[in-house]
């Protein structure tokens, strides 16, 4: 069966797996649940590969098929339309591949958890929605996936729903995402109002018509507003300023979840969406500029917070935020290809990092505070090496993945007009910070003297189901960037070329000058990474104690008090409003009052008429007869009144 | 060929007698029978109409009425048995708890 | 004269038929009792009636006279209407139920074609069921009217039993109706006529015309069991379970009224047997393929030797009566057989009825046989069996048959 | 005065008389018997109209099942002669005139309105509603209502069982 023709299979399989596990999993043994979950995901991965093969062998023509109408209202049509082009190929492969690896990992990691089947049901459901998101051929279907992954992320963050912090984190993620989604929906409405359709094909075709003018910088035309609104959604989903706050808390969820949803796939949905609608964005430099600035700011901002976090997962969370910032920076400066490239590599190494972190936590028996670790490199070699690979990769040392992706981003930022240099500078700084906090993590965790109690915690290497995916991911994060390897030596960037049908070959302008410049810049980047490494080494390689908490450190450690700020500025007023107005006045006063009033009225009427209730059935019978007579009288009136009053017919 | 009106008048008379029995009889079972009588009168009218209009719909309706009547009889008689057991009487006028 | 006949044939012919039928039925009933007593007696290694007439052949006559001459007491406190209505109802309905049964193919006599039976309704099966359905009242009413606990219990039991088994009875027939696609008994029989297949064409085996058939063995079993229950015969004769309720619903009845119940019961037996024959055993159809024309002489082949045997059996009889009666009967039978052998047209006319009555006789014998063999059900067993086994099975038969037919259609 | 008219009047008279006796009889069983007579008479009328299937069903279901249930229940409860209590003033004084008024209205309505419906030729030769055609309608046009009735009967059975069983 040609998979490409039946693209729906790819998302459907995880849905089935989810349904089966969710419905029957409670009764089943872990083995069966595993086989269902892994089977569905794995087969879906194979299907994806097959689809991609067919796609490529078919001259890599963008494939689009409308499977069935979903909403048809007037001129509006939102169908279950799936599409597959180069961009989707990358996303689908990343999602299914990394997803499958993480599923395998989870079987080991969650082995001793309650609600095992629930976890995998959610995870598969997430896969389903994520695939819908990336395969969708119109904004509405994309939004379905968008909301769906949001839901799954909520469910999975709150997986340990007995822990209040987890439940709160889930709620926080959901609500913050709502804000973004609100923007997204407004953007969609605006688009529909402008183009009378939400199909990607139609919208982009209409937008890329020559008569559609590019709105110059600082001018807020329809497209700009639409793009900005979409970008609001993206900031929500992809945890950019100012809506990034939910992601760190999302670490309450199980580590595989953090790896899959909050590092590899879901959070990159925003980037994907922006890249997908690049046609619109390129028509509005304003929006692009905003994207670039926000991305860049986030990259730096999050990195600074990441410097001082003590919780191993928190560090990774902030690093994720910052890396996402990078991607947006890339999109903002028009290097969508680079953004997606980084998205992919990031998926690899960040998944790797998270999983390794998970392995570490697993080894430490649930301990997450780096200050209670140390000297683990001897104990858990595989995890250590994998973690190291991931760190080197993220820090951007050649020939690891991020080196290429990040460099292409920085390069693009550097020669982007209006303020590119600044962006580049900040990005570079962020790179330094990145490599610093990552190596800080390495040293705190794996070197130095052990800061935990031998007798309480007995450190042990994780099972093969966990280490296996780690190694694979490690390999990927080593080689993941080599598509762009030739670019260094004047060759061409295969990845960019591969994506060029989607984004147009507008970026990575070749030429000798650019060539040499790129060499210089990458050298600089390497130097920066090294700088970070060295600083981290100087600070943390020797005997260390928990960082003092005052001044800047305190500020950073408390994440710039952003949460507190939000709480004071938004949450508390809202709570006050809803308690004192909505609840006490509207609900208790008006609604309940109305309901009770009705009830009392009814009771009063009942008191009045209940005296006709003699309880004697025959009287009731007579009442029925009277009623019948009245009804008949009304019905027969036109016939009867001549009969009664001697009218003539 | 009997004119349709005859059938209709007959059904009207039977229906009236049914109503009469319905209000006149005291025994629950008999009252129930009165209801059946009314149903039968209606059926007669149905068949007569379907004849007059040359369509079978009326007869289909009669079938439905009969089915419903059968179901109703099953449940109703069950209720009657229960009432008779609890109240020791079949006289509806003695079954009058349903009042203030 | 002849045109008068032609004018009022529609009136005269049925009257004649009815007269014949009633007479025949009453006689057959009478001798059915004789047969029953004989058979059961032999089952129980007794002689049975053998004093009144040769082989007790006149016993039925004696019984009849006894019934007529007996005093007819009416117990006190009976409900007069019900008490008188009940036996009449039973008998009338039982006899009426025979009126729609075709005993054979249409007869052509004097250029006037008439059906071998009283009425030829195109929903005769429904009519039959309608009549049998009303049959309950006779028993129930008798039980209630005669102001006697035993009778009341008998009446209650029988009404409950009849309602319960009527469902199974009706449902078990549905399969046949599905196959034949017609409610007229005559057509149902004709539909089973599958020329060269002979008895395989009967609904029992279901190789009906154009293969649109399905074996109705399940249906037949359900039908027959339910029918026995409907006729209140052993092993379902709880309404008159003498060991528990003296004589059940007709405890308080004597002489002719009792006889009416009696005749009614036997008549309904006959009716049910006819129905079974028609629905499942191809009515008047010969069990042999049409091509085997020799089998047409079967009646004579049976009649002649039987007649001769009766003849010679009578010769050696001691009483003068026997000497006259039996040889006479034997001679008549033998002569009839010979006549059939010689006159082909008469023979052809007789084929249908011959097979029909042969089959009916088998069923009646089966009835008696069971009475001689089986013990009586306990009441709760009876109900359980009816509702929990018979009904589901017959429904299953309907589903099965319709599914098969559907499959055949596509 | 054709034969059919004679038959009609005989049956009609039978039905009306039986209905009256239903009212006048004081013992439930007698009322039940009268009702059965009404039903049989109606079945005869159906036959007269050429609706043989309906007639048969009328007798089988109404006569053979429903009324048997009635009789059965009457016997089971051993219901005696009904006592003519008059607790309900409304019924005592208002009942009969009102009932008569109702039937009068219906009759008047029919008498006035039935000028509109003319006997159709199809009906004249009774060509319509062979049982086959009826079944066609039942299983084609009215199939969903039909299925629903089966469900209804199921519910009724359950209800009857639940009601009638003694709590033990």
Image: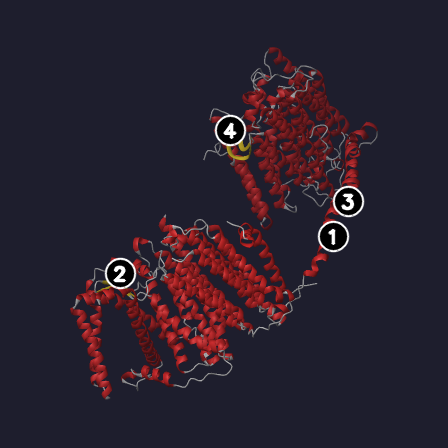
Left or right: residue A348 versus residue D62 is right
Residue that mark 4 sits on: A64
Parent chain of label 4: A
Of residues D20 and A419, which is closer to you in this image? Answer: D20
Q: Is residue A22 above or below residue D20?
A: above
Parent chain of label 1: A
- Counting from the top left corner in percent of width and height, residue A396 is at 66, 24
How far apart are the alpha carbons under marks 4 and 1? 61 Å
**Are the residues flagged by discs 3 and 1 from a single subunit?**
yes
The secondary structure type at the circle numbered 2 is: helix
Residue that mark 1 sits on: A600
**Are the residues flagged by discs 2 and 1 from a single subunit?**
no
Q: Is residue A40 above or below residue C358?
A: above
The secondary structure type at the circle numbered 1 is: helix
Left or right: residue C153 versus residue C115 is right
Residue that mark 3 sits on: A589
């Amino acid at each position: 069966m040609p998979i490409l023709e039946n693209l729906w299979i790819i998302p459907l399989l995880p849905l089935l797996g989810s349904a089966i596990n969710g419905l029957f999993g409670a009764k089943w043994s872990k083995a069966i649940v595993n086989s269902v979950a892994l089977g569905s995901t794995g087969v879906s991965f194979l299907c994806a590969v097959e689809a991609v093969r067919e796609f490529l062998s078919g001259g890599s023509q963008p494939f689009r098929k409308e499977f069935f109408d979903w909403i048809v209202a007037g001129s509006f049509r939102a169908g279950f339309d799936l599409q597959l082009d180069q961009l989707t190929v990358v996303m689908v492969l990343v999602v299914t591949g990394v997803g499958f690896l993480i599923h395998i990992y989870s079987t080991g990691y969650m082995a001793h958890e309650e609600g095992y089947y629930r976890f995998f049901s959610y995870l598969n459901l997430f896969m389903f929605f994520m695939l819908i998101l990336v395969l969708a051929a119109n904004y509405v279907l994309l939004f379905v996936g968008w909301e769906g992954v949001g839901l799954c992320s909520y469910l999975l963050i709150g997986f340990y729903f007995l822990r209040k912090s987890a439940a709160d984190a889930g709620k926080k993620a959901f609500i913050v995402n709502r804000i973004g989604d609100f923007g997204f929906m407004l953007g969609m409405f605006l688009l529909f109002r402008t183009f009378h359709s939400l199909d990607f094909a139609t919208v982009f075709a209409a937008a890329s018509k020559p008569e559609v003018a590019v709105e110059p910088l600082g001018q807020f035309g329809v497209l700009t507003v639409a793009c900005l609104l979409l970008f609001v959604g993206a900031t929500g989903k992809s945890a950019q300023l100012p809506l990034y706050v939910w992601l760190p808390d999302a670490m309450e969820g199980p580590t595989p979840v953090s790896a899959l949803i909050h590092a590899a796939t879901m959070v990159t949905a925003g980037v994907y969406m922006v890249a997908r609608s690049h046609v619109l964005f390129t028509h509005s430099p304003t929006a692009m500029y905003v994207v670039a600035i926000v991305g860049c700011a986030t990259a730096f901002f999050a990195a600074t917070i990441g410097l001082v976090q003590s919780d191993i997962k928190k560090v990774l969370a902030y690093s994720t935020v910052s890396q996402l910032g990078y991607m947006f920076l890339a999109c903002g400066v028009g290097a969508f290809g680079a953004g997606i490239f980084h998205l992919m590599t990031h998926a690899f190494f960040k998944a790797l990092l998270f999983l390794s972190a998970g392995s570490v936590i697993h080894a430490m028996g649930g301990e997450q505070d780096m200050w209670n670790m140390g000297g683990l490199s001897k104990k858990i070699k595989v995890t250590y090496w994998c973690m190291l690979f991931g760190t080197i990769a993220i820090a951007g040392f050649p020939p690891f993945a991020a080196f290429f992706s990040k460099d292409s981003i920085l390069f693009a930022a550097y020669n982007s007009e209006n303020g590119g240099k600044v962006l580049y500078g900040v990005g570079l700084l962020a790179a330094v910070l990145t490599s610093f906090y990552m190596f800080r993590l390495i040293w705190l965790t794996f070197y130095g003297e052990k800061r935990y109690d031998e007798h309480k915690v007995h450190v042990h290497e994780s099972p093969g189901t966990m280490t296996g995916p780690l190694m694979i991911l490690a390999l990927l994060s080593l080689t993941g960037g080599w598509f762009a390897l030739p670019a260094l030596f004047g060759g061409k960037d295969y990845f960019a070329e591969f994506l060029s049908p989607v984004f147009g070959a507008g970026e990575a302008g070749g030429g000798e000058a650019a060539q040499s410049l790129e060499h210089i810049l990458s050298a600089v980047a390497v130097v920066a990474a090294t700088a970070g490494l060295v600083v981290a080494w100087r600070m943390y390689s020797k005997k260390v104690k928990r960082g003092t908490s005052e001044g800047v450190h305190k500020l950073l450690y408390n994440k710039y008090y952003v949460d507190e700020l939000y709480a004071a500025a938004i949450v508390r007023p809202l709570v006050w409003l809803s308690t004192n107005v909505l609840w006490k006045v509207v609900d208790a006063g008006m609604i309940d009052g109305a309901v009770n009033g009705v009830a009392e009225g009814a009771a009063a009427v009942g008191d009045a008429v209940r005296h006709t209730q003699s309880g004697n059935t025959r009287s009731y019978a007579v009442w029925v007869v009277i009623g019948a007579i009245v009804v008949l009288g009304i019905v027969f009136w036109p016939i009867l009144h001549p009969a009664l009053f001697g009218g003539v017919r | 060929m009997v004119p349709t009106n005859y059938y209709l008048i007959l059904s009207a008379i039977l229906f009236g007698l049914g109503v009469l029995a319905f209000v006149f009889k005291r025994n629950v079972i008999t009252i129930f029978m009165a209801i059946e009588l009314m149903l039968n009168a209606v059926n007669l009218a149905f068949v007569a109409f379907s004849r007059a209009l040359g369509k079978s719909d009326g007869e289909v309706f009669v079938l439905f009425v009969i089915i419903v009547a059968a179901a109703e009889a099953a449940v109703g008689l069950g209720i009657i048995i229960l009432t008779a057991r609890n109240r020791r009487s079949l006289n509806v006028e003695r079954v009058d708890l349903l009042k203030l | 004269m002849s045109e008068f006949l032609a004018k009022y044939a529609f009136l005269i012919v049925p009257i004649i038929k009815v007269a014949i039928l009633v007479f025949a039925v009453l006689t057959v009933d009478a001798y059915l009792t004789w047969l029953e007593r004989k058979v059961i007696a032999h089952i129980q290694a007794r002689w049975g009636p053998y004093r009144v007439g040769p082989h007790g052949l006149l016993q039925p006559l004696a019984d009849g006279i006894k019934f007529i001459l007996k005093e007819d007491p009416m117990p006190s406190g009976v409900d007069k209407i019900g008490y008188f209505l009940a036996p009449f109802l039973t008998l009338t309905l039982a006899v009426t139920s025979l009126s729609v049964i075709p005993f054979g193919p249409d007869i052509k006599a004097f250029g006037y074609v008439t059906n071998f039976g009283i009425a030829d309704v195109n929903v005769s099966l429904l009519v039959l069921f309608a009549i049998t359905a009303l049959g309950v009242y006779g028993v129930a009413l008798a039980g209630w009217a005669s102001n006697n606990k035993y009778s009341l219990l008998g009446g209650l039991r029988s009404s409950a039993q009849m309602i319960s088994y009527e469902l199974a009875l009706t449902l078990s027939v549905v399969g046949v109706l599905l196959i034949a696609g017609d409610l007229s008994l005559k057509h149902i029989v004709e539909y089973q006529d599958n020329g060269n297949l002979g008895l395989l064409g009967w609904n029992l085996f279901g190789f009906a015309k154009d293969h649109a058939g399905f074996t109705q063995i399940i249906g037949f079993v359900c039908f027959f069991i339910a029918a026995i229950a409907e006729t209140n015969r052993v092993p379902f004769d709880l309404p008159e379970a003498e060991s528990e309720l003296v004589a059940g619903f007709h405890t308080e009845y004597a002489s002719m009224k009792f006889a009416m119940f009696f005749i009614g019961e036997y008549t309904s037996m006959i009716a049910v047997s006819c129905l079974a024959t028609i629905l499942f055993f191809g009515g008047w159809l010969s069990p042999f393929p049409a091509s085997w024309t020799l089998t047409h002489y079967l009646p004579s082949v049976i009649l002649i030797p039987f007649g001769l045997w009766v003849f010679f059996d009578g010769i050696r009889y001691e009483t003068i009566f026997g000497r006259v009666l039996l040889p006479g009967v034997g001679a008549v039978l033998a002569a009839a057989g010979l006549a059939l052998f010689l006159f082909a047209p008469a023979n052809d006319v007789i084929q249908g009825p011959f097979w029909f009555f042969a089959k009916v006789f088998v069923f009646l014998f089966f009835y008696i046989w069971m009475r001689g063999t089986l013990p009586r059900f306990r009441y709760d067993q009876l109900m359980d069996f009816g509702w929990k086994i018979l009904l589901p099975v017959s429904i299953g038969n309907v589903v099965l048959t319709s599914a098969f037919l559907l499959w055949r259609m596509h | 005065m054709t034969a059919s008219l004679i038959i009609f009047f005989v049956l009609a008279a039978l039905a009306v008389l039986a209905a009256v006796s239903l009212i006048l009889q004081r013992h439930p069983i007698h009322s039940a018997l009268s009702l059965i007579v009404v039903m049989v008479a109606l079945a005869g009328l159906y036959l007269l109209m050429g609706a043989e299937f309906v007639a048969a069903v009328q007798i089988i279901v109404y006569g053979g099942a429903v009324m048997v249930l009635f009789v059965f229940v009457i016997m089971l409860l051993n219901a005696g002669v009904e006592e003519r209590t008059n607790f309900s003033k409304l019924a005592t004084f208002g009942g009969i005139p009102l009932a008569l008024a109702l039937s009068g209205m219906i009759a008047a309505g029919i008498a006035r309105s039935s000028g509109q419906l003319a006997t159709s030729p199809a009906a004249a030769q009774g060509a319509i509603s062979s049982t086959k055609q009826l079944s066609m309608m039942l299983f084609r046009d009215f199939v969903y209502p039909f299925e629903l009735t089966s469900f209804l009967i199921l519910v009724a059975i359950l209800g009857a069982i639940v009601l009638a069983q003694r709590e033990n």
